[in-house]
């Protein structure tokens, strides 16, 4: 699973600026600084991930409504599953 994580973090950023919300770059920079700080303090990736999800999901629901937020999360899960190794390769 760490290989998939590393691949995703190393992926080039191909964001269409016309499809991004206002001040996306600024917000992304702030989040990345906070993640770096947390990692420097020894906070683990699983704790960071749980925290980021717990902060992101309510904001997705507020921004897009529960049905569309659910579709976004399901689409994200499908993308992750498509790139995830099989159970056999984890052993």
Image (spheres, rainbow, N blue to C red):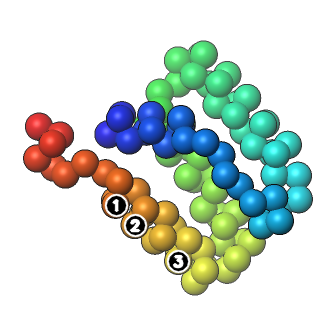
Position of residue 24 relative to residue 79, above or below, is above
The numbered mark, 2 or 3, whose residue comes first in the sequence reads 3
Query: Would you say the residues marked 3 and 1 are in contact, meaning their CB atoms lie under 8 Å apart?
Result: no
User: Percent from the top left, x then y, of residue 36?
Assistant: 65, 24
Task: Identify the residue at image location x=53%, y=37%.
Answer: 9
Mark nearer the viewer, 2 or 3: 2
Label 3: which secondary element:
helix
Mark nearer the viewer, 3 or 1: 1
Mark nearer the viewer, 1 or 2: 1
In this orientation, which residue lies closer to the viewer: 41 or 21? 21
Task: Identify the residue at image location x=34%, y=60%.
Answer: 82
Label 1: which secondary element:
helix
At label 1, counting other C-alpha atoms closer than 10 Å, the crowd grade (few under 14, some 14-19, many 20 or more) is: few
Query: Would you say the residues marked 1 and 2 are in contact, meaning their CB atoms lie under 8 Å apart?
Result: yes
User: Percent from the top left, x then y, of residue 33?
Assistant: 73, 29
Q: Which residue is mark 1?
A: 82
Q: Which residue is mark 2?
A: 78
Question: Is 28 on the left-hand or right-hand side of 72?
Answer: right
Q: Which residue is mark 3?
A: 71
Query: Would you say the residues marked 2 and 3 are in contact, meaning their CB atoms lie under 8 Å apart?
Result: no
- Distance from disc 1 to disc 2, alpha carbons, whole Å, reads 6 Å
Position of residue 74 relative to residue 26, above or below, is below
Q: Quadrant of the N terminus?
A: top left
In this orientation, which residue lies closer to the viewer: 12 or 20? 12
Q: Quadrant of the C terminus?
A: top left
Question: Is 44 on the left-hand or right-hand side of 12?
Answer: left
Q: How many marks?
A: 3
Label 2: which secondary element:
helix
User: Percent from the top left, x then y, of residue 8?
Assistant: 49, 43
The numbered mark, 3 or 1, whose residue comes first in the sequence reads 3
């Amino acid at each position: 699973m760490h290989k998939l994580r590393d691949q995703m973090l190393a992926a080039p950023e191909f964001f269409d600026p016309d499809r991004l919300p206002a001040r996306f770059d600024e917000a992304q920079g702030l989040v990345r600084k906070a993640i770096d700080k947390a990692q420097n303090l020894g906070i683990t990736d699983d704790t960071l991930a749980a925290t980021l999800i717990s902060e992101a999901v309510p904001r997705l629901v507020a921004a897009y409504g529960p049905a569309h937020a659910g579709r976004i999360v399901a689409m994200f899960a499908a993308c992750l599953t498509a790139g995830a190794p099989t159970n056999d390769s984890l052993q």
